[in-house]
Each structure stands twice: as structure tokens, then as C-alpha cells.
Image (cartoon, grey):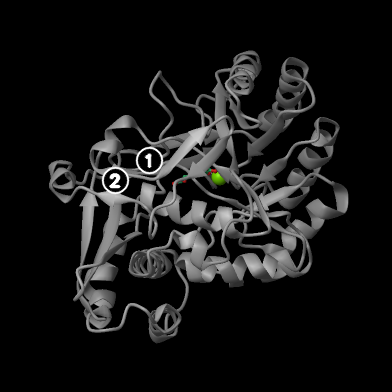
Amino acid sequence: MKITNAKVIVSCPGRNFVTLKVMTDEGVFGLGDATLNGREKAVSICLEEHILPSLIGRDPANIEDIWHFFYKGAYWKRGGVNMAAISAVDTALWDIKGKVLGAPVYNLIGGRSRERIMVYAHVTGRDAEETAEQAKGAAAAGFRAVRIQSGIPGIDHTYGVPGGRAPYEPAEPGLPKEYFWDTSRYLNFIPKLFSRVRQACGDELHLLHDVHHRLTPIEAARLGRELEPFHPFWLEDPVSGELQEGLRLLRAHSTVPVAIGEVFNTMYDYTTLISEQLIDFIRLPPAHGGGITHALKTAAFASAYHIQTGYHGATDISPVGLAAALHCDLALNNFGIQEYMPHQEIVREVFSWNYEYRDGDMHLAERPGLGVEIDEAKAKKYLYRCASLPVNRKMDGTLHYW
Ligand code: KDG
Ligand code: MG
């Protein structure tokens, strides 16, 4: 069997997605998600100019060899753009393998380890009161885990909280917007938010929160310690992950579980974090972390240290990327939880998929390969639109992490 052609499909049904389609001489094709929010064109050029010409002619069965060809062969290893491109190739090859063998991908990587995949919902409110009400509503609708993000007194715009009635979408049309941030107001408020939500929802609902990289290690340690009475399921990206050693400080002061790595791109970004047990959940999903091949290795490394998966699943992971994560979620013994932020309805015009949310869990139907299709004619109707993630400044104008 040979790869005869491959193409990159950039489409914007409500938001931009970059999808790779790899075709073979036997008519079987595979899909991979190459979406990197705000850097879509960089990945599509990387694929078209630097990767696909060397992919054509290879045997799609040899996934491990092809992975190393593009990883080691790039010489400039790692990096978000390169790894998103490699992830898409790898995922498409697993899709092909599944279709050729007539098996869902999860059956090729160990089979079912569980009946269903626990997901967490996004719960937001303009203030603690509204967030608590929304959390109660989500629990009543069947969710057993919710991520709580709230407007903060004295800060005009907070990460994760939509301005109007539209669902939250991280990238906004045009060039990056600039928002303002105040760490001390944030730190004073979040324990009050957790207290209010616990009061409204009781003890059983799993509560998660995304700090979105904004604290220093000692600030994160303070927050972790103050949230302990409310036993969060996790605190996500409490500090920017570049300084892996920084997590030692948080660990020294708090038992709050930590999830990190949605902006990482290989297992090498995790070496200190995993081997020193400084975190509890890995966030790096197959779509950005080297595809299914490398995700399995990262998960195996984590499992030796009792660390679980909690894959990133925001709307900028396409249905193809989410399906790749769900196949791993179903098969991995050290699965923890999966993020679920539903795509807008309009996305169904371009993609169809085999996963379904029911009663707090995601369920995967038995279909060969990944189980996701793309309608190329419809995809063409939705032209790419420039959209960017915002940036954050401290109140005095200093550029900070968003
Ligand atoms: O593109 C950026 C988003 O994926 C990110 O802001 C979402 O942090 C996020 C999350 O946890 O879903
Ligand atoms: Mg996050």
C-alpha cells in the first residue's frame, strides 16, 4: 500500500480548522487535525511545503518509522507548528490503519479499558453567584465534573468567561485584543468562588479551575493551599510551564492536584514534571503532542509515576483531534478525565463524528478508524478568517501571560 496524495483543508465553520487528508492507492484515506489556534497558516504551509512531499510514496502502515522520519528528520525538533503538523500526519495514518483492518483505533492501541469517558463541562458566570447557579445546572444535567471560571470584581475581562451571550471562543476575529489583569484581585477572589460553588453544589461534584498560566510559583502555592478545603479535582496551568522546576514550590506547599501542558508539544516538556511527580494530570492532547503514537508514549511515561491523562479539548481541537483523544481515553489505563467544550452546531455542516455526550460521559461508536468524516464541498464554503488569541497586560501596562 502506498500514500498517493495528501491535502490540507482549511475551513472556517464558525472558527478555523486545519484538516489533513492522506490518500492511498487502495482508495482508503485518513484524516488528521492540524489546527493550531492563531497559527493555522503556519501549520498548513509546514505540511504543504516541508512534510507532504516526503510523505507521498511511503507505506502508510509504517507509522512509527514515518513519525521518526519527520521528527528526527526535521533536525529542528519539537516546536508547536512542527509538532501540530507531525500530529496530523500520525493521526491520519492511524485512521488509515483502522480502516484497513476494519477496527476502531482504540482496538489497535489496547482495546477498551472502560465503558465510558468522564468529561468536564465548562461553567462560567459573571460573578460567583451566577457561576454557582450554572454549576448547579450542569450537575442537574448530568455532569459529574465542571470547570469553573468567573468574572472577577475589578477586572474587565477574564479568561474563559464570554462577554455576551455567545458561547466562549478563545480566538477573536482580527489581530490580538489586549486585556488587563490583576493578580492580587484574582487571588483574593478565587477561594471565595470555590466556597460559593461548594455551598451551592455540595461535596460530590468535581470542581476544576484553569489559572491559564498567570501566577508565579509562590502565588500558585498560596492559591493551592487556600483551595485545599474545597478539594478541587485539579488546578490547571497554575504557572507558565516553561520553568518545570517552578512546580516544586507549589508541591512543597499544597496537596491540590495539578494539571499542566496544553501548550506543550512533546513528552520532553514533561521530564522533570513527571519524574519528580510535580503534577497529577497531563494535558497535552494527541492533536498537539505528536499524534496518537507519541501520546501513547507520554501516557506510558506518566503512568509509571501514577500520573493520569486529562486531555485538552477546547473548541480549537477539531472533531478529528477530539476523536483521536477519545480513542486514547478509552484505551489508556491511566485515563483521568477529558475536557469537553462542544463545537458550535455549524461545525456539523463540515464534519460528522462518532462520539456522543450522554449523562456526564462521552461514548464512542464502533466505527473503523477514527470515525470522523469531512465534507470537502461544504468545507470550501467556509473560508479562512484571521482570528487571534488575546494578550494580557498588568494594570500598569506590563505584558503578562494570557
Ligand atoms: O487556543 C487556546 C485555548 O485552547 C485555551 O485557551 C483553552 O485553556 C484552555 C482550556 O483549558 O480549554
Ligand atoms: Mg487550559
Residue 191 seen in this snapshot: yes
The earlier-in-sequence mark between 2 and 1 is 2
Task: Please give the name of the residue rendered at 45% of the width and 38% of the height, measured from the top-left corner.
Answer: 356
Q: Between residue 117 and residue 180, name the one nearer to us.
A: 117
Q: Is mark 1 within 8 Å of ligand 1?
A: yes
The mark closer to the camera, 2 or 1, is: 2
- Residue wearing tag 2: 16
Residue 14 seen in this snapshot: no
**What is the spatial separation of the Cα atoms under label 2 and label 1, in whole angstroms?**
9 Å
**What label does residue 264 carry, if any?**
none
Q: Between residue 18 and residue 38, name the one nearer to us.
A: 18
Callout 1: SS: loop
Task: Please give the name of the residue rendered at 22% of the width and 53% of the height, measured from the top-left corner.
Answer: 10
* Image coordinates for residue 251, horizontal then vertical, percent: 82, 54
- Residue wearing tag 1: 171
Task: Please give the name of the residue rendered at 38% of the width and 47% of the height, measured from the top-left corner.
Answer: 319
